[in-house]
Amino acid sequence: MFSGFMEKLVAGRWIAGPNVDDVIERGRRFNKLGIGSIMNYLGEALTDQKDINDAMDNYREILRKVKKGDPLTQISVKPTQIGLSVSLDMAEKNFSEIVRLAGEKEIFVWVDMEESNLVDQTIELYQSQMPNRSIGLCVQAYLRRTPQDVKNLTEKGGTVRLVKGAYTEPENVAFKSKEDIDRNYVEIMTYLFDNAERFMIASHDDKIIEKAREINKEKKKDVWYAMLNGIRNQYLIQLQKDGEKAFSYIPFGKKWIQYSVRRMQEAGHMSLLMKSIIHGQKI
Ligand SMILES: Cc1cc2nc3c(=O)[nH]c(=O)nc-3n(C[C@H](O)[C@H](O)[C@H](O)COP(=O)(O)OP(=O)(O)OC[C@H]3O[C@@H](n4cnc5c(N)ncnc54)[C@H](O)[C@@H]3O)c2cc1C
């Protein structure tokens, strides 16, 4: 658990706590409601071997402690916390270990997507473990390239988690207006409904989520819905009650500032924090 006042107020909304046991405990609380957990250790752009080992140790510990074959437990790994900022080779070696350990526990592994200059290497990293069916890759609808990436990945049998995108990107690579990003999101989502069997809609946007649910009444695909812990927990609970497969993405670790700042920037400074205090409903 966090101890400082600011940590409790800000990070406590979205982050399980500093340790593996905190995220496992928070995951269990969601699991009791029938909601899956996606555990993510905080930290990115790591170049110090000690920090990379620490990130790896945290994933090793999760995979040692979680129950075998639990469909409500997944993990999500940032490429630059397992060595991509040092070399693709290092990231591939570490990712193959995580995928092997997760495979022994039958746990699904996601690869997070970071800045646009890392997309090619991140796809390569993901593909280094294909055709494993228990791994998936996050793709960002704000990037102009993503429809083509999703087509390539889907044709190879990949599994994607579709998000809008959380980093500040230049206009030549990314759409900037909400309207354009949402349009691209819906186009990619429509492609997935037509061409993929299983994928994850990761968003808090009720318009998009309800549109997906409407399309799926006819398509009957295996759709997972995911939200970040503490943003719209009540809506997530409602989705689960309505019979959808719902997941909460739960970060943990000591490096909570960068993550919390990104969340606050998303919906206009303090408004996301205020909204999430009202709608988040701590689990
Ligand atoms: C499971 C998951 C994994 C992610 N992984 C990545 C990743 O690997 N890489 C990456 O770049 N990004 C990732 N993201 C973040 C993502 O890119 C977006 O930054 C973030 O989800 C905000 O976009 P949105 O789809 O929720 O839509 P927004 O456009 O931010 O919000 C849309 C609408 O949702 C509603 N809304 C939002 N929050 C609230 C609230 N608290 N209460 C009430 N209504 C609300 C509002 O109506 C708002 O207009 C992930 C997000 C999720 C959910």
Image (cartoon, grey):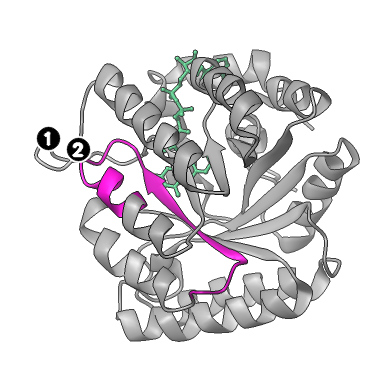
According to the picture, the residue beneath numbered tag 2 turns out to be: 174
Give the residue displayed 43% in from the left and 32% down from the top: 190
Q: What secondary structure is marked by label 2?
A: loop
**Relative height, residue 178 to residue 44 (above, below):** above
Closer to the camera in the image, 217 or 158: 217
Identity, as a three-letter code, of the amino acid under mark 2? Ala
17 vs 198, left or right, is: right
- Residue 158 screen position, x and y as percent: 47, 61
Query: Do the residues under discs 2 and 1 have CB atoms within 8 angstroms?
Result: yes
* Magenta residue check for 145: yes
Query: Which corner quadrant of the image does residue 21 belong to?
Result: bottom right
Find out if the beta carbon at label 2 lies less than 8 Å from the nearest ligand 1 atom. Answer: no
- Mark number, residue 121: none
According to the picture, the residue beneath numbered tag 1 turns out to be: 171
Q: Which residues are magenta?
A: 130-150
Asked whether the viewer can see residue 240, the reply is yes
- Residue 88 screen position, x and y as percent: 32, 79
Give the residue displayed 47% in from the left and 14% down from the top: 271
Closer to the camera in the image, 113 or 221: 221
